[in-house]
């Protein structure tokens, strides 16, 4: 008798959950198509030129190159011994190294919007002014000696605007991470524009370096 009662309760709960899907469906972002990928372009809404990119950027020894045109991701390991092996791929639009961002001869500009929906409703269009190109900087490749003040870097181009999407305050331990919550315009090499929102930097296990990017391209 108890077994039958348990089954009935379970069926009742499942029925509620099924109903909730219908009730809450309009609340959540449900793209028209889903790629099913764990990483990369995990959702693509072709009708609205938008989607979600999810990448594992936790490894300090790699760059993740993103191609908005073809919806592809390419990872390249940094060779600290031979700089000649650190050439960029042929086709890409922007890339991430941990929280650093660079562009492929592009430029970027911050907006006052905190969601892509706000941006679209405003009908704001980039006019080419106020965009910043990449500058030569450095990225961290080895944190193993951090406690001894021995951190290893390599030179790299960095976009000073896009790289502000996450502030890491190391003045106290543990560091304080703060999202800018700003939408950015990315001007591509061919003159097209994309809108980017870096919305998260941790995964479900609270491990850092797992980055979620919402985009509109072309914008």
Image (cartoon, grey):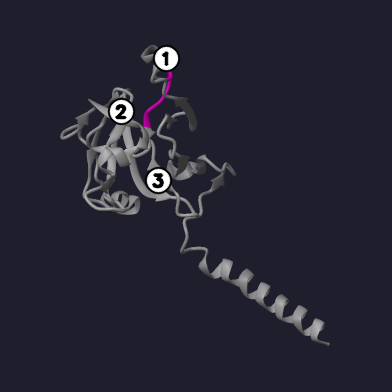
Residue segment shown in magenta: 89-95
Depth order, front residue of 3/114? 3
| Dot 2: element | strand
Depth order, front residue of 200/183? 200
Ranked by sequence position, the earlier of labels 2 and 3 is 2
Residue 22 occupies quadrant: bottom right
Ranked by sequence position, the earlier of labels 3 and 1 is 1
The x, y position of residue 47, in whole percent, is 47, 44
On residue 7, which mark appears?
A: none
**Callout 3 environment at 10 Å: few (<14), some (14 to 19), or many (20+)?**
many
Ranked by sequence position, the earlier of labels 2 and 1 is 1
Marks 3 and 1 sit apart, C-alpha to C-alpha, by 31 Å
Q: Determine contact: label 2, label 1, CB under 8 Å.
A: no
Nearer the observer: mark 2 or 1; the answer is: 2
Classified by dominant secondary structure, the portion drawn in magenta counts as loop
The residue singled out by tag 2 in the image is 153
Look at the image and tell me in which quarter the N terminus lies. Answer: bottom right
Q: Is residue 199 magenta?
A: no
The residue singled out by tag 3 in the image is 214
Look at the image and tell me in which quarter the C terminus lies. Answer: top left
Residue 145 located left or right of residue 35 = left
**Callout 1 environment at 10 Å: few (<14), some (14 to 19), or many (20+)?**
few
| Dot 3: element | strand
Tell me if I can see residue 217 in this picture. Answer: yes
Nearer the observer: mark 3 or 1; the answer is: 1
On residue 85, which mark appears?
A: 1
The x, y position of residue 95, in whole percent, is 38, 31
């Amino acid at each position: 008798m108890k077994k039958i009662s348990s089954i009935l309760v379970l069926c009742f709960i499942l029925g509620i959950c099924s109903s909730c899907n219908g009730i809450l469906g309009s609340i959540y972002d449900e793209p028209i198509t889903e790629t099913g990928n764990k990483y990369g372009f995990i959702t693509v809404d072709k009708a609205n030129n938008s989607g979600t990119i999810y990448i594992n950027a936790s490894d300090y020894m790699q760059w993740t190159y993103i191609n908005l045109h073809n919806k592809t991701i390419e990872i390249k390991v940094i060779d600290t011994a031979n700089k000649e092996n650190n050439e960029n791929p042929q086709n890409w639009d922007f890339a991430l190294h941990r929280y650093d961002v660079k562009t492929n001869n592009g430029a970027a500009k911050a907006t006052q919007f905190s969601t892509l929906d706000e941006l679209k409703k405003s009908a704001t269009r980039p006019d080419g002014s106020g965009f910043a190109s990449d500058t030569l900087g450095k990225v961290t490749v080895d944190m193993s000696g951090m406690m001894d003040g021995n951190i290893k870097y390599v030179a790299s181009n960095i976009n000073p605007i896009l790289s502000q999407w996450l502030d890491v305050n190391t003045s106290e331990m543990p560091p304080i991470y703060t999202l800018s919550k700003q939408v950015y315009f990315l001007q591509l090499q061919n003159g097209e524009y994309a809108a980017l929102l870096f919305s998260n930097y941790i995964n479900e296990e609270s491990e850092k370096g797992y980055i979620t990017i919402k985009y509109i391209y072309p914008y």
